[in-house]
Image: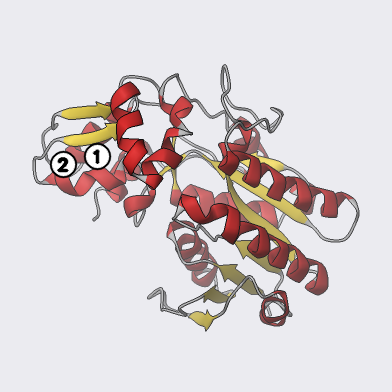
Amino acid sequence: MDRHLVVGAGPVGRQVAALLAARGSHVTVATRSGRSTGIDGVEHLTLDAADPDALARAAEHAAVLYNCANPTDYTQWDAVWPPLAASLLAAAERTGAVYAITGNLYPYGPVDGPLTEDLPDAATDHKGRLRARMWAEARAAHEAGRLRAVEVRGSDYMGPGVGQNGHISRVVPAALRGRRAHMMGRTDLPHTFTDVRDVARTLVAAAEDPEAHGRTWHVPSNPPVTQRQALTDVLATVGRPPVPVSSLRGPAWAAAAAVSPMLRELRQLSYQWEAPYVLDSRAAQERFGIAPTPWEEVCRGTAEV
C-alpha cells in the first residue's frame, strides 16, 4: 500500500496530509498530542518524534517520511531541533523511507540579489545555522548512501490555515476589523510569499522523484510584492478596504526585543525585511511542472481566518 508518515500538523503538515489522502494514499499524521486534523481518511498518532525507536516503528512501512515539524518557539530551537532531527534521520535510515524535509530560507543568511538553490548556506544567526546543519547532515547521509533525502524551501507563508505562522496572516484578523496592521521591517520592499499548498505539492513531488533527491528545491512562488500590498490584496479579496500600516524597525525593534525573547529572535532575521527578498523558484517549476497558486487565490485563502 502507498503509505506515508507526516510528522507535524502545522500548516504544511495538514496540506501534505490532505493532498496525499485526496489521491487515496494511506496517511498517518504524527504529533505529540495526537489531535485530529479533521482531514477525511487520515490516521492520527500520538508520538514523540524525538524518540527514534518509536518513530522508526511508526515509519516502518512508509514510502516517505515527511518532516513537517515546526517548533513555534524560536527560543527553544537549540534544545528541540537537534534530537528531533537526529531521530528523523535515524528513522529514515532504518526503514528506507524517503526523507522529505520542509525547510526554509534561513540557512542562506543575508543575500544580495535573488535567492537561488546554488547559494551557499551562510547563515549568521543561530536558527539559520541550525537549519543549515540539519540539511548538511541529511545531505551527507544521502551522499553516503545511508538514506534518500530531499529538502524544499519556501519563503514566508500565506494561504489557508497559516495563522500566526505568517507575517501577513497574523495581522489579517485585526485588519479585517479595520484596525491598523503592525508589521516588522520595511513594508515598501519587494518580498516573496509562498502558499502553503505549493509547499505541500512541491514536497510530495520532490519526494517521489528519485532524480530530485540529494538537493534543495525552492517552492514555486508568485512574483514578489511589498508587505503592504500583500495585505491590501488579501483584504480586497473579501471586499475590505486597505488599513493603515505601521512598521517596527531600528531602535523601536531593539527596545521591544530587550523585553520580548520572541521579538529578539525575530530581530536576528530582520535582514529579510530591510532589503528586497526575492526567491527564484524556476528550477522547481521546470522540474516538477508546478506553477504557483494564482495570487488572488493565495490572498483569498489567507483571508480565511
Q: Position of residue 272 (x, y in %)?
A: 46, 28
> In this orientation, does residue 35 appear?
yes
Name the residue type under label 2: Ala
Q: Residues within 10 Å of mark 2 (few under 14, many from 20)?
A: many
Residue that mark 1 sits on: 234
Tag 2 near tag 1, CB within 8 Å: yes
Number of marks in the image? 2
- Earlier residue among tags 2 and 1: 2
Q: Residue at x 72, y 62 (%)?
A: 86
Q: Is residue 31 left or right of residue 49?
A: left
Whether residue 158 is visible: no
What is the crowding at mark 1: few (fewer than 14 residues within 10 Å), some, or many (at least 20)?
many
Q: Residue at x 24, y 48 (%)?
A: 303
Q: Is residue 250 left or right of residue 180?
A: right
Closer to us: 281 or 257: 257
* Residue 212, position as x, y percentages in the image: 75, 47
Q: Which residue is at the front of the view, 100 or 31?
A: 31
Q: Nearer the viewer, residue 24 or 147?
A: 147
**Residue in the foreground of this view, choosing between 256 and 125:** 256
Distance in Å between CA atoms under marks 2 and 1: 10 Å
From this view, report whether residue 70 is shown above or below residue 109.
below
Quadrant placement of the C terminus? bottom left
Secondary structure type for disc 2: helix
Q: Work out whether 275 lies above or below 51.
A: above
Question: Which label is found at residue 89?
Answer: none
* Residue corresponding to mark 2: 175
